[in-house]
Amino acid sequence: MTSSSAAAHPRFAEALDALGLAEVNGRLRRFPDATRTAAEAAAAIGCELSQICKSLIFAADGVPVLVLMDGASRVDVERVRQELGAAEVTRAKADVVRETTGYAIGGVPPFGHRTRTRVLADRSLLAHDIVWAAAGDPHTVFPMPPKELVDRAGATLVDVREQDV
């Protein structure tokens, strides 16, 4: 693991500056191996899987929406549909993710996207003092208190994770 202020994707670095979060650059962690999945990121960081914040793009009636979810949980698409009052919610395809956010799947951060989207954050993120999220590429992550992350992302807190049956 290495730390570098130059590790952030340029768009994400600009977002950090615009949000007054330049100090996050000093907390970035860059890994030689990709951390595209929550499990890979948790293993590289040495944290619990649930401390990873996944940034997932869905299409609600064709309109992109970002869902922030803890790494140990899965999004319940039906709950997202109900929350949004949409007729249909599906996982967005890779090209839609890149077009909407400006980032590739596996490196999508919770904020600093190319276009503004509606953001939902599952309450499960608040179970930790610190969560880790992608910093614009599949090799770089950053830590942040979850409440601050939710606020900076402009997210609405919701309960949209799959429940154990």
Image (cartoon, rainbow, N blue to C red):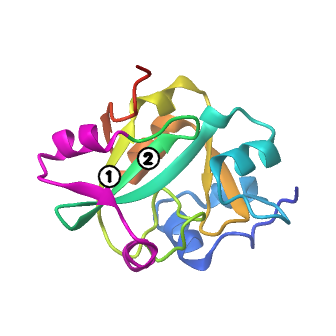
Q: Which residues are magenta?
A: 76-100
Q: State the residue position of label 2.
A: 68
Q: From this viewpoint, which residue is outermost toward the top?
A: 165
Marks 2 & 1, CB-CB < 8 Å contact: yes
- The magenta stretch spans residue 139: no
Identify the main secondary structure in magenta: helix
Image position of 72 (left or right of 89): right
Image quarter where the N terminus lies is bottom right
Residue 93, compared with residue 135, is above or below; it is below
Residue drawn where x is 38% and y is 41% of the image? 121
Whole-Å distance between the Cαs marked 2 and 1?
7 Å
The kind of secondary structure element at disc 2 is strand
Mark 2 and mark 1 lie on one chain; the one further toward the N terminus is: 2
* Nearest the eye: 53 or 146: 53
Image position of 20 (left or right of 75): right
Residue drawn where x is 59% and y is 27% of the image? 128
Image position of 39 (left or right of 163): right
Image quarter where the C terminus lies is top left
- The amino acid type, in three-letter code, at marker 2 is Leu
Residue 83, compared with residue 135, is above or below; it is above
The residue carrying pointer 1 sits among few (fewer than 14), some (14 to 19) or many (20 or more) residues within 10 Å by Cα, namely: many
Residue 47, compared with residue 132, is above or below; it is above
- The amino acid type, in three-letter code, at marker 1 is Val
Q: State the residue position of label 1.
A: 119
Quarter of the image for residue 81 reads top left
Q: From this viewpoint, which residue is outermost toward the front?
A: 165
Quarter of the image for residue 129 reads top right
